[in-house]
Image: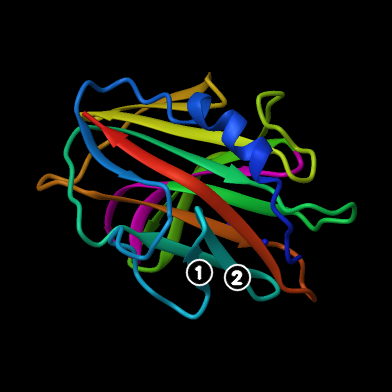
Amino acid sequence: MRIAVLSLALAGLLATGAQALACDGSEIIFEDTFEDEAGGWSHKDTVEMKDGSFIFKLPADDMQSNLNVTYTVKNADICTEAVWPQGGDLPILGAGLLFWGEDNRTYYQFGILNNGRFWIARKQDGAWLGTIAANIDTPAINTSPGASNTLRVNAQGDTLAFYINGTKVRELRGQAPRDGWRFGISGDNFDKQKEATVLFTNMKVTD
């Protein structure tokens, strides 16, 4: 699924940060505030990590994903905070949380759009196999330019629960990877002519 150079309102982001990482697990497996490039993410020309932000730099009509390379989990509560760009004339943008990932071609994606909709989809060997939830409207998404949204997936065995800003929007049963899986984030730009960005300000994984 698919993000105009942005100016960051850092004070506003910090104000929402405590609420953002509301993962319930008692043990912290992973935490990254993107102050540097040491968090185990793939380095690409389309990715920048600095000053507390993970930024996807997206060409027109493009989607980028990034699974963490250094951590593998079996049961995990995953949270991340995504921020829409500033500006009054934004294209349709998407921000996603990746789970049950095996590599950058095989994973599940829980994403939100800045038009107030969310989706859940599965990618296998580089091809989208199907959409479990397709562009579902929800008032839980903050759609204003510059607004932040907390995405959360609680994966326990074969059972999943999906949250947006603390509101549960879906539950799902499926087949988790047998030998553990990786987590990550993604950005989508649906504008067919202009480049765009989407950014994340933190990520936390607990058990």
Looking at the rendered structure, the secondary structure element under dot 1 is strand
Structural distance between the alpha carbons of marks 2 and 1: 8 Å
Horizontal side, residue 141 vs residue 163: left or right = right
The N terminus, quarter of image:
bottom right
Eyeballing the image, is 12 above or below 87?
above
- Per the rendered image, the range of residues in magenta is 98-115
Where residue 7 sits, quadrant-wise, is bottom right
Foreground disc of the pair 2, 1: 1
According to the picture, the residue beneath numbered tag 2 turns out to be 57
Looking at the rendered structure, the secondary structure element under dot 2 is strand
Q: Can residue 109 be found in the magenta stretch?
A: yes
According to the picture, the residue beneath numbered tag 1 turns out to be 48
Tell me where residue 141 appears, x and y as whole percent. Answer: 67, 31
Q: Can residue 35 be found in the magenta stretch?
A: no
Q: Nearer the viewer, residue 158 or 189?
A: 189
Q: Amino acid at mark 1?
A: Glu
Q: Amino acid at mark 2?
A: Lys
- Circles 2 and 1, Cβ within 8 Å, touching? The answer is yes
Magenta portion: prevailing SS class: strand
Work out whether residue 88 can be spotted.
yes
Packing grade of label 1 (10 A; few <14, some 14-19, many >=20) is some
